[in-house]
Image (cartoon, rainbow, N blue to C red):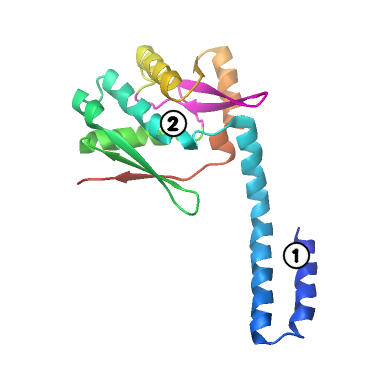
Amino acid sequence: MWSALSAGAFAISDVVQDLDGTEAAGALGMLAASAAALASLPGLAKAARLAWRNGSVEGSLEQVGMVVLLALVRAGLASEADGRDGRFEVKASLDGRRDIVLRGVSRSTERQVMHAIAEVLGPVQNARYILMRHSRLGWRTRTDYHPLPSALGARKDWAESFAALWSARVGSSRLVYTRTPEGRRVLLRARAKSLAAGFQRSVDRRSAWL
């Protein structure tokens, strides 16, 4: 990649010598744009490869937030009022980040929900339960893994409630308990292959108090 870029730079430098100031500036700008595009190729290629293999929940962040909130309500860790009044807003920035804003809940619930969302969307580490998420792309079935929030993984019935909400609102998934030999193997595979581990998107957690 860099040898190609260097060759391009030398070629443009030869042309720039024969141009006036405005044309030279344009040629240099073209070189800078080409360099930026080439430099970004490895990251873009990795993101495309992982998205093809694993899929992504970026288009379902509002639903993911509601799953977390409602699961906390069902577990008695958040109030019924928070479950009724809470609403999410997801904003996309020009650099590809997603800003998740939660409105209509208490400050303590907001903190708990945002922490749980960060766990679900973060890399797989040593969660008691993980979700195997399946999605379709044409003929291909893609699989990714999400750790359950630690608060909801503390009890089996809470974990099962979260999994049921996820399947209903986000998509097909399977709940895996990682404290068995089979579950441990799934956990190790999840650590190596999850989309979050391979290419971590930035998710900003914002409070909104009106």
Q: Amino acid at mark 1?
A: Leu
Label 2: which secondary element: helix
Q: Earlier in the sequence, mark 1 or mark 2?
A: 1
* Residue drawn at x 45%, y 25% as measured from the top left: 170
Evaluate if marks 1 and 2 touch, with contact meaning CB atoms under 8 Å apart. no
Q: Quadrant of the N terminus?
A: bottom right
Q: Which mark is drawn over residue 5? A: 1
Along the line of sight, which residue is nearer the eye, 82 or 21?
A: 21
Whether the magenta-drawn stretch holds residue 128 is answered as yes
Q: Residue at x 60, y 36 (%)?
A: 51
Q: Position of residue 114 (x, y in %)?
A: 34, 37
Q: Main secondary structure of the magenta part?
A: strand
Q: Is residue 162 above or below residue 92?
A: above
Please state the horizontal and vertical placement of residue 106, each as a whole percent of the image.
20, 35
- Helix, strand or loop under label 1: helix
Q: Which mark, residue 120?
A: 2
Specify few, some or many for label 1: CA neighbours under 10 Å numbering under 14, 14-19, or 20 or more. some
State the residue in front, 75 or 100: 100
Residue 6 magenta-highlighted = no
Label of residue 156 in the image:
none
Whole-percent x, y for residue 89 in the image: 34, 40
Q: Nearer the viewer, mark 1 or mark 2?
A: 1
- Front-most of residues 182 and 145: 145
Mark 2: few, some, or many residues within 10 Å (few <14, many ≥20)? many
Q: Residue at x 67, y 64 (%)?
A: 35
Name the residue: 63% across, 49% down: 43
Relative placement, left or right, of 30 versus 90 is right
The three-letter code of the residue at mark 2 reads Val
Whole-angstrom CA distance, mark 1 to mark 2, is: 40 Å
Boundaries of the magenta span:
124-151
Q: Is residue 125 left or right of residue 210?
A: right
Q: Quadrant of residue 36?
A: bottom right
